[in-house]
Image (cartoon, rainbow, N blue to C red):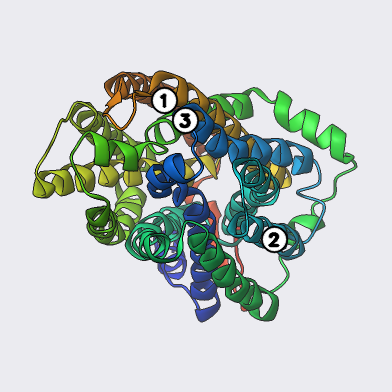
Amino acid sequence: MGNHMKNSAAENSEKFSRYHVFVIAVAALIQFSIVLDFMVLSPLGAILLQKLNINTHQFGLVVSAYAFSAGASGLMTAGFADKFDRKKLLLFFYSGFIIGTLLCGIATSYQFLLCARIVTGLFGGVIGSISFAIITDLFPMQVRGRVMGFVQMSFAASQVLGLPVGMLLANKWGWHSPFLMIAGFSVIVISLIVIYLKPIAEHLKIKSDRNAFNHLAKTISQPQYLRAFLATTLLATGGFMLMPFGSAFSIHNLGLTLDKLPMMYFVTGIFSIVFGPLTGKLSDKIGKYNMFCVGSILTIIMVSIYTNLGVTPLWLILVVNVLLFTGISARMISSSALMTAVPEPSDRGAFMSINSSVQQISGGIASVVAGLIVVQVGDGPLMHYNTLGIVVNCAMVVTLIMLFFINKYIKNKTGKIKPAEHIPIMKEEGLITEKIINE
């Protein structure tokens, strides 16, 4: 009887209703717009350095301005994140993100663009944490790897669709046009959220006497949460260090021409779209931490190769980039799914907000540091990019160790509930909850 119940539960947890599919799709579209807004700066880097007459340090500040403001915003809203319907919270911050992106699209100077990125970060930096809190509310741990695999496809989709289109628009109509495209796309997404997304307020039924500031203080002070935040700090170091100067490195060091840059992002993104969901599904089968280890090892190898390349044939650049982003994608999907299991339900929104803030702030610091390490003389090649590769690889090794202990904590935490007592229940309105049967 017990085995039958477990099998039925497993079957139910594998099935997604039409509403579940919609939620996953909307979460992916939201992430797509947020990621594209950030990532589009990387390929625009080579253009902005010339058009705005700025140096690598100033460009690093443009990138990090978003990250720092996003981090500050996440900390300020963390105490309130569990006090409101998540749909309303999402609509408020997504509206602000659209306004900020529109400001980037009409910026006329370096100072204007810097301020616009700060505004965009204040709103955009919180949206990812709200989306992950929604996913954690609606889907149990057993299928969260699959869900994250689809949602994190947004990174690949931004490469396949967004970046090439953004680069083509930038080459034809100027660097403002990609931001205007993102703002227009986001208006469509927010319309879908307003019309079709149902209120998400189950967490409000959990009684709590804590005010916002006490909630924030309690969340920050918990040892298990602090370990997760520290791991997130190191997780962010790698991507934020290599990403801002990716296009400049490809052009000035690898010998790639500006018109070939969209092809590189397109090919890499296509493979990432294919491998993303497979990685998510595999992480549910072999374990999130095991998948993270595989992704980390692959990434370390490819970072070591990539950052030491000189002028390279296009086909080899494509192969290296595909393998590099496959490893990065595996790390992102598995670690995101793993982190969702750390907080208690009553702390979920606050934890996700703080975790997002930590990621953004550490990423901002990494971008500034990268801007100080990387040097370019005139239109010559970037120097010391291989030094970034060493720093990134060291951070990944330490992160492997830290996530080992976080994974151990999660296993101990979930192990207290017997398998037969832990049954996913799918409600008609599309909400998956976890029911614990009392002995």
The mark nearer the N terminus, 1 or 2, is: 2
Assign a secondary structure to mark 2: helix
Taking 175 as reference, is 47 above or below it?
above
Residue 291 visible from this viewpoint: yes
Residue bearing mark 1: 399
Front residue of this view, candidates 240 and 1:
240
Percent from the top left, x then y, of residue 407? 45, 32
Instruction: Give the tally of numbered discs.
Output: 3
- Which amino acid does the dot numbered 2 rest on? Ile
Label 2 CA crowd tier, 10 Å (few <14, some 14–19, many 20+):
some
Q: Are marks 3 and 1 in contact (CB under 8 Å)?
A: no
Residue drawn at 22 percent across, 35 percent down: 298
Q: Position of residue 279 (x, y in %)?
A: 30, 52
Work out whether residue 323 or residue 138 is closer to the camera in this orientation and state it: 323
- C-alpha separation, residue under disc 3 versus residue under disc 1: 32 Å
Q: Percent x, y for residue 282? A: 29, 52
Mark nearer the viewer, 1 or 2:
2
Q: Which residue is mark 2?
A: 99
Q: Amino acid at mark 3?
A: Asn
Q: Residue at x 41, y 47 (%)?
A: 47
The quadrant where residue 152 appears: bottom left
Q: Seen in the image, is 380 located left or right of residue 395?
A: left
- Spatial CA span between label 2 and label 3: 27 Å
Q: Which residue is mark 3?
A: 55
Mark 2 or 3: in front is 3
| Residues at circles 1 and 2 in contact by the CB criterion of under 8 Å | no
Tag 1: amino acid: Thr
Q: Secondary structure at mark 1?
A: helix
